[in-house]
C-alpha cells in the first residue's frame, strides 16, 4: 500500500523546521549556507575569528587608555605631594631657612616616585614664589610634569599637545 504525500504539507513542515532551527537576527542569518543548505563548523569558526579581529583593537585601546589614565592620576598624586613636601620643608621654623635650591632638592627627591616610560624620563619643573597674604609671608611651590605614559601620553606628545600635570601648594611661614 502506498502512502499519499501532500507536497504542500511537506513544504510547510520544511519551513517550520527552518524557522525553528535559526533565531531571527542572529549571526547565522548573515552566513552563507554550506552544502545542502547547512552552515558548517568551519564557517562558524571563521566568522568568530573575523568578529574577534574586529573587536580586538577596540578592547586593546580601552585597556591601554585605562592604564594610562590610572598612571596619570598616580603621577598627579605624586607631584601634588611633592609640592606639599617642598612647601612644608620651606616654611618650617629653622635658622637659616632653606634656600630655593634645597627646596627644589626636596621636591625632586619626593618626585622620584613618578612613573615614566622611555629612555629619557621627564624631570618635574619646580617654581618657587615668596609673597605675602594679609601681611603674613607665604611660600608657593608649583610643580609641573609632562606626562609620558604608555600610549595616551606619547600620542598627545606626538600631536604637539603634551599632557602637563601641575600642582601648587601655598603655605604660611611659621
Image (cartoon, helix red, strand yellow):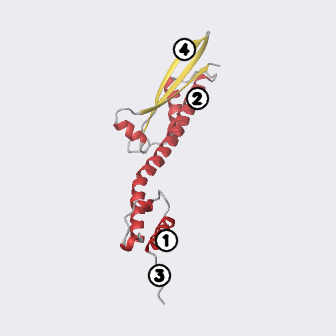
Circle 3 or circle 4, nearest the eye = 3
| Residue displayed at 43% across by 47% down | 61
The number of discs equals: 4
Q: CA distance from mark 3 to mark 2?
A: 95 Å
Q: Secondary structure at mark 3?
A: loop
Q: Quadrant of residue 96?
A: top right
Residue where numbered disc 4 is placed: 131
In the picture, the disc for residue 13 is: 1
Q: Earlier in the sequence, mark 3 or mark 4?
A: 3
**Label 3–label 1 contact, CB within 8 A:** no
The crowd level at tag 1 (other Cα within 10 Å; few <14, some 14-19, many 20+) is few
Q: Earlier in the sequence, mark 1 or mark 4?
A: 1
| Residue displayed at 46% across by 44% down | 65
Q: Secondary structure at mark 1?
A: helix
Q: CA distance from mark 4 to mark 2?
A: 17 Å
In the picture, the disc for residue 70 is: none
Quadrant into which the C terminus falls: top right
- Residue located farthest toward the top when viewing the structure as drawn: 135
The crowd level at tag 4 (other Cα within 10 Å; few <14, some 14-19, many 20+) is few
Amino acid at each position: 500500500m502506498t502512502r499519499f504525500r501532500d507536497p504542500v504539507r511537506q513544504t510547510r513542515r520544511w519551513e517550520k523546521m527552518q524557522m525553528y532551527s535559526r533565531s531571527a537576527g542572529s549571526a547565522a542569518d548573515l552566513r552563507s549556507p554550506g552544502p545542502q543548505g547547512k552552515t558548517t563548523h568551519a564557517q562558524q569558526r571563521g566568522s568568530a575569528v573575523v568578529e574577534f579581529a574586529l573587536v580586538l583593537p577596540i578592547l586593546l585601546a580601552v585597556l591601554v587608555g585605562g592604564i594610562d589614565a590610572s598612571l596619570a592620576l598616580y603621577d598627579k598624586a605624586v607631584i601634588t605631594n611633592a609640592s606639599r613636601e617642598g612647601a612644608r620643608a620651606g616654611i618650617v621654623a629653622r635658622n637659616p631657612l632653606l634656600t630655593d635650591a634645597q627646596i627644589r632638592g626636596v621636591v625632586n627627591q619626593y618626585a622620584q616616585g613618578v612613573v615614566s616610560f622611555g629612555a629619557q624620563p621627564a624631570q618635574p619643573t619646580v617654581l618657587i614664589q615668596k609673597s605675602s597674604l594679609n601681611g603674613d609671608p607665604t611660600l608657593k611651590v608649583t610643580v609641573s610634569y609632562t606626562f609620558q605614559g604608555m600610549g595616551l601620553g606619547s600620542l598627545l606628545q606626538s600631536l604637539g599637545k603634551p599632557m602637563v600635570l601641575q600642582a601648587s601648594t601655598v603655605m604660611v611661614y611659621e
